[in-house]
Image (cartoon, rainbow, N blue to C red):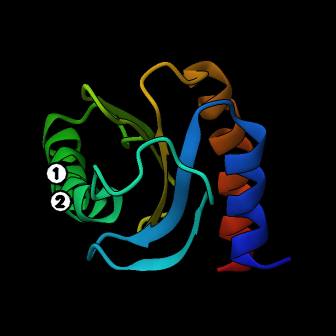
Amino acid sequence: MSFETHLKAVVLGVEGAVACSLMGFDGIAVETYQAQSSALGAAVDVQGAWIEYSSILSQLRNTAELLRTGNVVEVHVGTEKLFTLIRLVNKDYFVVLGMLPDGNVGKGRYFLRLAAPQLKSEL
């Protein structure tokens, strides 16, 4: 299976999902799947937001290590127009899902939890 196949399954399986990416901590997307008919349209730069979030995620990992609270597993960022779920795949990569604020967040978390080990096995 390709990365895109896994990412597409997440977007199509979660109500309100608009895009899903496998990204490195450098902010570069390895692969992205975006829904054709996104209600967000061009109003939100999803990829740009995720590039910036990758920097914050790196800081969160460092903070968790410093505080000895264990590894960061998942992060959620909610804004008025975009709800973002991030799940770490390994020390170098994470999978990120963008959703409409009224999307099914619980189902999004579940699909990312299932997708992460599949993506990890293909890296």
Q: Is residue 89 visible?
A: no
Please state which of residues 18 and 62 is positioned toward the viewer in this rendering.
18
Disc 1 target residue: 56
Question: Neighbour class for label 2 at 10 Å: few (<14), some, many (≥20)?
Answer: few
Q: Residue at x 55, y 23 (%)?
A: 105
User: Which quadrant, please, contains the C terminus?
Assistant: bottom right
Whole-percent x and y of residue 1? 86, 76
Whole-percent x and y of residue 61? 25, 49
Q: Is residue 53 visible?
A: yes
Q: Residue at x 24, y 64 (%)?
A: 48
Q: Give the left or right position of residue 18, taking residue 114 as reference.
A: left
Element type at mark 2: helix
Q: Which amino acid lies under the numbered mark 1 shown in the image of this protein?
A: Ile
Q: Residue at x 26, y 77 (%)?
A: 26
Q: Give the left or right position of residue 29, taking residue 46 as reference.
A: right
Residue 52: give its label: 2
Q: Give the left or right position of residue 18, taking residue 3 as reference.
A: left
Q: CA distance from mark 1 to mark 2?
A: 7 Å
Element type at mark 1: helix
Q: Determine contact: label 1, label 2, CB under 8 Å.
A: yes
Question: Neighbour class for label 1 at 10 Å: few (<14), some, many (≥20)?
Answer: few
Q: Give the left or right position of residue 7, taking residue 62 as reference.
A: right
Residue 109: give its label: none
Please state which of residues 40 and 88 is positioned toward the viewer in this rendering.
40
Q: Which amino acid lies under the numbered mark 2 shown in the image of this protein?
A: Glu
Q: Residue at x 49, y 18 (%)?
A: 102
